[in-house]
Amino acid sequence: MTENKRKRYTKNGLSQDPPAYMSVQAKTTWRQIVSALGEIKELKKSDAKLIEMYCTQYELYRNAYKHIQENGEVQPIYDTVQNNLGEAIGKDFKGFKRNPMTSIYNDAIKSLNNISRELGLTPKSRKELFDAIDKGDGESVAAIKKLFG
């Protein structure tokens, strides 16, 4: 952090500035999530680790999806055919195998869903949050419904 740049925080203490080590994609996701969650009093500065995990999982999800788009869900398997001197003279098609990035993609989606529920980013978790907050003061309810409504 330079002397000219001051860290900015939301009302609940979350840093608006993402961790420096994050990639461009993760930093963009951080800013979006913190912008949406920064007014929620129930979130604390300690919840930043959950947001950090969400952002890095989102990056994995995006990278895996890009790789799958470029290389397909499955990859062909070939055996090399050799002559009696051991020289490669061709390839013998054996079938297909699953692209390993599909596993990374699926794992990232599961992690994103779990973390999303913890942060109140899914419709069901927002409803539960609204129901719990409806029992509290009207100011909190109005702020959250404005963000997610």
Image (cartoon, grey):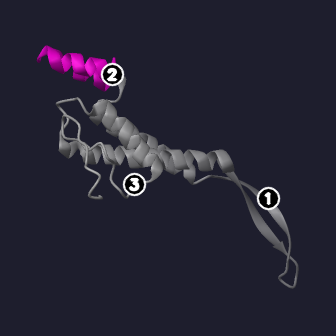
Give the residue drawn at x 40%, y 47%. Answer: 27
Mark 3 lies on a secondary structure that is loop
Question: Which residue carries the number 1 mark?
Answer: 93
Residue that carries the numbered disc 3 in the rendered image: 22
Quarter-of-image position of residue 136: top left
Q: Say if the magenta span includes residue 77.
A: no
Pointer 2 residue: 148
Tag 1 near tag 3, CB within 8 Å: no
**Visible residue check, residue 38:** yes
Q: Secondary structure at mark 1?
A: strand
Mark 2 surroundings: few (<14), some (14-19) or many (≥20) residues within 10 A: few
Contact check, label 2 and label 3, Cβ < 8 Å? no
Q: Position of residue 14 (x, y in %)?
A: 23, 41
- Disc 3 marks which amino acid? Met
Which residue type does callout 1 highlight?
Answer: Phe
Mark 2 to mark 3 CA distance (whole Å): 26 Å
Tell me which residue sits at (31%, 43%) in the image.
Answer: 51
* Residue furthest front in the image: 4
Q: Is residue 53 left or right of residue 91?
A: left
Q: Quadrant of residue 50?
A: top left
Of mark 1 and mark 3, the one earlier in the sequence is 3
Q: Tell me where the magenta segment starts and ends, as one range.
A: 124-149
Q: Give the spatial CA distance, label 2 vs label 1.
A: 52 Å
